[in-house]
Amino acid sequence: MLKQALAQNGLIAILRGVRPDEAKAVGQVLYDAGFRVIEVPLNSPDPYTSIRTLRDSLPADCLIGAGTVLTPEQVEQVRAAGGQVIVMPHSDAKVLRAAKAAGLYLSPGVATPTEAFAALAEGADVLKLFPAEQMGPAVIKAWLAVLPQGTLLLPVGGINPDNMQVFTDAGAKGFGLGSGLFKPGMTADQVASRAQAYVAAWKALS
C-alpha cells in the first residue's frame, strides 16, 4: 500500500514539531491537497497522540507514519498509536527487524550504497536518501545503476518545488518534505498553500 500511495502522489509530508491540537486541521489540508503519506517525527510534542489523531481523522487511503524512529520500543509505540510507516534517519537493523515483525512499512535513511543494500536485505519498502542536499542527483543516478530494479529512492532535505525536477530526472520516485512544507506555528491555511504548490510542481513532473 505504501508504494501504491507514492505512485498516486510521491510526496511525503513531514510534520516535525506538530502539536496534537493542530494535527487534525493540518492533516486535513494535506489530504485535500493530495498527500497520501503523512509522517510525525517522534521528536515532536506528544507525537503518539498526533499519530492517533491523524489516523482517526483521515481516510484509510492516507498512510500515517512516524519519523525519527530510533528504537524497537518506539516501533511498538507507533504501532499501538495506529501508525503504519516507520521512517528512520539511519538504518539500524534492530529497528528494521522490529518494524517488519510488527507488519509496518519501512523507510530507513541511507547515505551509502552499503547501507542501501543492507536496508533492502532487511525488507525496506523504500529508501530515504538523507540528507539530499549533501547527496545530489548524481548520487541517485549512480546508485540506481546498481541497486535492484524497482528500488524507490526518496530524497529528503532541502527539497522545494523548484529543484524536484533534477532529482526525478536522475530517477527519484518521490520526496520527503519537511520545513519547506510545515514549520511549527504555521496555520492550516499556510500549510495548505505550500502543500498545493508542492503538489502542482509534482504533477508538472509526471
Image: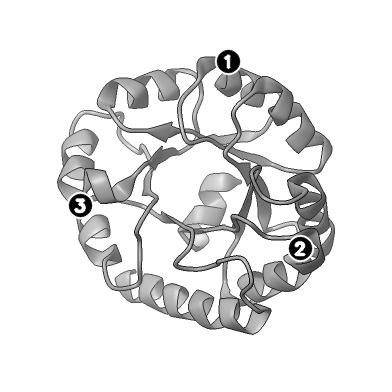
Res. 95 in view: yes
Disc 1 element:
helix
Of 37 and 160, nearer the camera is 160
Q: Which residue is mark 1?
A: 94
| On screen, residue 190 above or below 88 | below
Disc 3 element:
helix
From the viewer's perspective, is 124 left or right of 168? right
Q: Which residue is mark 2?
A: 59
Residue 60 x %, y %:
75, 57
The tally of labels here is 3
Q: Which residue is mark 3?
A: 170
Spatial CA distance of label 1 from label 3 is 31 Å
User: Could you classify mark 1 by the number of other residues whose Cα lies within 10 Å: few (under 14), some (14-19), or many (20 or more)?
Assistant: few
User: Could you classify mark 3 by the number of other residues whose Cα lies within 10 Å: few (under 14), some (14-19), or many (20 or more)?
Assistant: some
What residue is drawn where x is 82% and y is 42%?
81
From the viewer's perspective, is 142 left or right of 6? left
Residue 78 x %, y %:
74, 37
Q: Earlier in the sequence, mark 3 or mark 2?
A: 2
